[in-house]
Amino acid sequence: MTRRTRFGFGAVLAAASLVLVACAPAPAGDGGTQSEACVRMVTNSGGLEDRSFNQSSWEGLQQAQTEYGIEAEAIVSTGETDLAPNVQQAVDSGCGLVVTVGWELAEATTDQAGKNPDLAFAIVDETVEGDNIKPVVFDTAQAAFLAGYLAAGVSKTGVVATFGGGNQPPVTLFMDGFADGVAKYNEVHGATVRLLGWDKAAQDGAFTGDFEDINKGKALTEGFIDQGADVILPVAGQVGEGAASAAVERGGVSVIWVDSDGYETLAAQYRPVILTSVLKNTQDAMVQIVGEVLDDAFTNEPYVGTLENGGVEIAPYHDLAPLVSTELDAEIDGLRQQIISGELEITSPSAP
């Protein structure tokens, strides 16, 4: 059930500026001062430059800062012991919107939201229940399906692969969609492209066990390449950089990035191997939520990014566009439209 939580200028006066309000000069002659609107974001241990949803969430809040004239600050977590204290610090800041990023912050977010019912909380990439908590989640299986179809279509070896940082719904959702996309390509073309690293039926596969150790991602990718894989989808945050490194060194291998456009966010040396990226448009979600708070329209109804609302998508093919035939690109666009129309439904146990 959706609960509307009210945050308005009157509440600011009553609650010592504990809510988000528009930045506007006080009317002349009333002796007042400018009201300061603010939001605090707490990262998980990946930090602000994780080339993933910490970074994209922060970019969205910076856009909101420009668009609405609010003040946005990020509180960076470096380890598990930082998480709860950092959410407490965000609450103590006096800002009316607290954004937390990732499943690691679910417990602290729930705890503080319960203690502070007049504040608005948003948590990115995790579903948490609370009257004043808005989950910001993405049906990445839809876009990953397109990426899987693409991977199967460009593979020269007939073998593609994926791996995750951990066996968690936000990770396996990508892997489910990717697997279904490969299977769809095989069905349409009578092909036999094999997928390494994930068994959708068993909901189990290859995982590095963390989202930070690049060497683990490189070693796992090298193992896939040794088995013939020439397109790799790492769903592991910074660990995915190890996959890109292995692809560059071994040659003839491409990588599909996740969350943000890897061609833009990774080091330039990896651009030649980035085929596409499965995007989460966290930026627009952040701008939308800040606007809802300012408009006194914030609710706990989840924001779910889909192909239809532009919350998920695949990135341009950039330097590897020559690998994608006009026919394959047209097939992918047709599948996109089928998903948007509801004609083709992409399912996953991890779907939001």
Image (tube, rainbow, N blue to C red):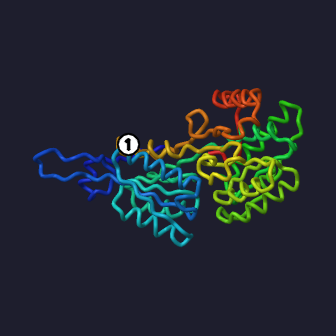
Query: Which residue is more in the foreground, 140 or 15?
Result: 140
Counting other residues with Cα less than 10 Å from the Cα at mark 1, is it few (<14), some (14-19), or many (20 or more)? few
Query: Which residue is more in the foreground, 79 or 276?
Result: 276
Instruction: Give the image quarter of residue 210.
Output: bottom right
Residue, far left: 29
Query: Which residue is more in the foreground, 306 or 245?
Result: 245
Query: Which residue is more in the foreground, 155 or 282?
Result: 155
Under mark 1, the amino acid is Glu
Query: Vertical placement of 312 versus 98: above or below?
Result: above
Left or right of 86, for residue 231: right
Task: Kindly identify the residue that appears in the image at 28 percent across and 51 percent down.
Answer: 11
Query: Vertical placement of 292 versus 107: above or below?
Result: above
Locate residue 218, reporting x and y percent: 75, 61
In the rendered image, the quadrant that contains the C terminus is top right
- Residue pointed to by mark 1: 67
Instruction: Give the image quarter of residue 177.
Output: top right
